[in-house]
Image (tube, rainbow, N blue to C red):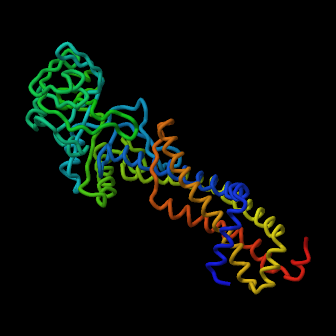
Amino acid sequence: MRRIDLVGFAAGAIAAHPMRSALTSLGVVIGVAAVVMMTSIGLGAQQRVTSAIGGLGSNLLIIQPGASRGPGGGFVSQGAGTGMTLTDGDAAAIAAQVDGAVAVAPGVRGAAQLAAEGANWSTRVEGVTPDYLLARDLTIAEGRMFDENEARQGRKVIVIGQTIANELFGPDSDPIGKRIRVGSVPFEVIGLLASKGQSGFGQDQDDIVLGPLQAVRSRVVGRRVKGDNVQTIYVKAASADDLDRVQEDVSNLLRERHRIRPGAEDDFSVQNMASIMEAMQASVKTFTGLLAAVAAVSLVVGGVGIMNIMLVAVTERTREIGLRMAVGARRNDVLFQFALEAITLSVIGGAIGLLLGVGGAFLMAKLGDWPVAIAPWSIPVSLGFSMLVGLVFGAYPSWRAARLDPIEALRRE
């Protein structure tokens, strides 16, 4: 028999029992929809992690005082309540002695109440050096950043984020040259940062005030930071390839400066943003894979459903099979027709499941504020996998139909 005729027979058999065909495909619909939703949510979470860490700056090391190693020594965590062990001198030594460190920015930070033109706003104020912009991948939208002289002299000038400008001066006003009282100290606004929006962790990155390190340390943060201590040192490496070497050089230099004996615990932590991002992405991938594997069980159940219904169909259509064989149909023709029916039912279920999965993912994103991203490969993979399910689970019923004896088949009622 011609293949086109067998395709027609298969389509006719599916169309003749629409309800049974729909129920046969239902398991595949649910399975594919679940897999697409899980992978979309996992990919969205992975992109959010990448965005959140990438927003801190690229090729970045964050050095903090008073750190200790976690269980197993593999993860470095900040030790709460430990002393201030980093100084301006440490930052200067890193900038002077570590090759590949293109920006070194020591900093302190504290919360403060801002007031200007009758408006008030509470935010965080960071005392930094001019290299902070390069280290954190920030840019100036209007005005300028304070220079080295202003930073060294502790001039009362600040650079503000877009949120500060909007809250204190209004969305359409020019804040450059205006004064803001930070706590009880008036500062002049000399620059406006370009907007970075919300971070992947939901933090408003435009709600920030940058001032010279000396000025913020002495006039805003006060007694919380003594002498020339700093709370953070940001180090930007020239490239991602240099990051591990720069981290090692920074650790060795600080251990030497802090006179830490061999084998003794560091009194600081160096957080490598690339390593953290890699570890978090690996964790998200693992959970995504587990969720997809659990969802894939539905596909297997759907495949079992297809095999069950196809076996029933073979029993019901025994006389039809015998009649076709009697008029010249070969065993391969019967095998092809029933396999085609199983694959068609599975692929149709896969296509419907794909649409439902994409719709469900966006619905969950809207209702639950989940990050989702539809992977382009999910479309061919879903359809291909549903076809594979139909082929595998339709193989036995098709083989059973093809093995029927035409004489015995015609005798059956």
For the C terminus, the quadrant is bottom right
Out of 368 and 48, give the one closest to the viewer.
Answer: 368
Q: Is residue 161 positioned above or below 330 on the image?
A: above
Out of 249 and 163, give the one closest to the viewer.
Answer: 163
Out of 190 and 293, give the one closest to the viewer.
Answer: 293
In the picture provided, is 295 more to the left or to the right than 212? right
In the picture provided, is 246 more to the left or to the right than 292? left
Please state the horizontal and vertical placement of residue 272, each as a whole percent of the image.
36, 49
Please state the horizontal and vertical placement of residue 29, each as a whole percent of the image.
63, 55
Please state the horizontal and vertical placement of residue 220, each as a whole percent of the image.
23, 22
* Residue that appears at 53% across and 49% down: 72
Q: Quadrant of residue 409?
A: bottom right
* Residue that appears at 25% across and 16% down: 120
Please state the horizontal and vertical placement of residue 25, each as a whole percent of the image.
67, 58
Q: Quadrant of residue 146?
A: top left
Q: Is residue 394 positioned above or below 175 on the image?
A: below
* Residue that appears at 32% across and 36% down: 85
For the N terminus, the quadrant is bottom right
* Residue that appears at 11% across and 30% down: 190
Out of 284 and 329, give the one closest to the viewer.
Answer: 329
Q: Quadrant of residue 227?
A: top left
